[in-house]
Amino acid sequence: MKARLTRHDRPTHPTGSESGSPSPPDAQRLLEIYLNDHLAGASGGVSLIRRMARAHRGTPAGPPLAELAEQIAEDRESLREIMTALDVPAQWPRVVVARLAEKAGRAKLNGRLVSRSPLSDVLELEAMRIGVEGKALLWQSLGLLADPRHHLEPAAVDRLLTRARQQAAVLEELREEAARRSFTPTAAGPAPSGRSQARPDGAPRPGGVSRRAGWA
């Protein structure tokens, strides 16, 4: 049986560049950069999904987009709470820059000069899907740090991760429908109702969104 080392017997480990891994102060600094980058991305994502929900208000795609907008805003608040628990201050200039970048992205060419193009739906949904997948990776990374002593419950992080995966599934359904509507001469089948549908096994689809949510 191996002997247990006492505090004085434990070997010392090089820090910083000597070991190839960051020292504790460097680790905290890297965590601050990482979480603030995600906070900035989350703020841009909230702005984008809210605008998408407004643009499709009154259409079959409106309800699922509105639900996603609410969830994604809640996730941003969860990230802020986690940053507080980990003693990571928010760097608001990054958040402002992210919001400005989201607004600037609206001016990109989409095949029309004045009115909103169906291509906008495809590009925006792709951007949101990528953002949500990045958020899922964020929760996975934070799961490595989850510890009740740090006021970061593993179960809470797991719930955020599960919801991010459900959000990605809903966005993919909406993206497929938008691409089908944009790139095919005629849409097959009757106009979808946007109501929740069950899978063949009887289970509801993630987020309660139908396979064909429909668009304006």
Image (cartoon, rainbow, N blue to C red):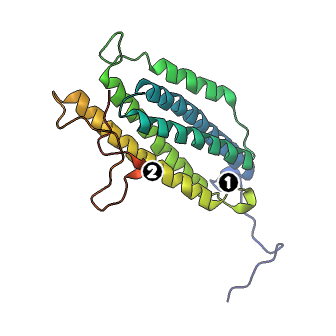
Dot 1 or dot 2, earlier in sequence? 1
Rendered residue at 68%/49% (across/down): 27
Rendered residue at 37%/34% (across/down): 61
Q: How many labels does the image show?
A: 2
Residue at mark 1: 18
Q: Pinpoint residue 80: horizontal percent, then vertical percent.
A: 67, 41
Outermost residue toward the top? 114
Q: Pinpoint residue 64: horizontal percent, then vertical percent.
A: 42, 39
Kind of element beneath mark 2: helix
Amino acid type, callout 1: Glu
Q: In the rendered view, does 87 fall on the left or right side of 156? A: right
Q: In the rendered view, does 117 fall on the left or right side of 39? A: left
Q: In which quarter of the image is residue 155?
A: bottom right
Dots 1 and 2: beta carbons under 8 Å?
Answer: no
**Residue 71, placed above or below residue 7:** above
- The front one of 116 and 66 is 66
**Residue 84, placed above or below residue 149:** above
Q: In the rendered view, does 183 fall on the left or right side of 201? A: left
Residue at mark 2: 165
Residues at marks 1 and 2, CA–CA distance in whole angstroms:
39 Å
Kind of element beneath mark 1: helix
Outermost residue toward the bottom? 1
- The front one of 33 and 151 is 151
Q: Can residue 196 be seen in this view?
A: yes
- The front one of 19 and 92 is 92
Q: Quadrant of residue 15?
A: bottom right
Amino acid type, callout 2: Arg
Q: What label does residue 192 carry, if any?
A: none
Q: Is residue 86 visible?
A: no
Quarter of the image where the C terminus is located: top left
Q: In the rendered view, does 206 fall on the left or right side of 6? A: left
Q: Pinpoint residue 181: horizontal percent, then vertical percent.
A: 24, 30
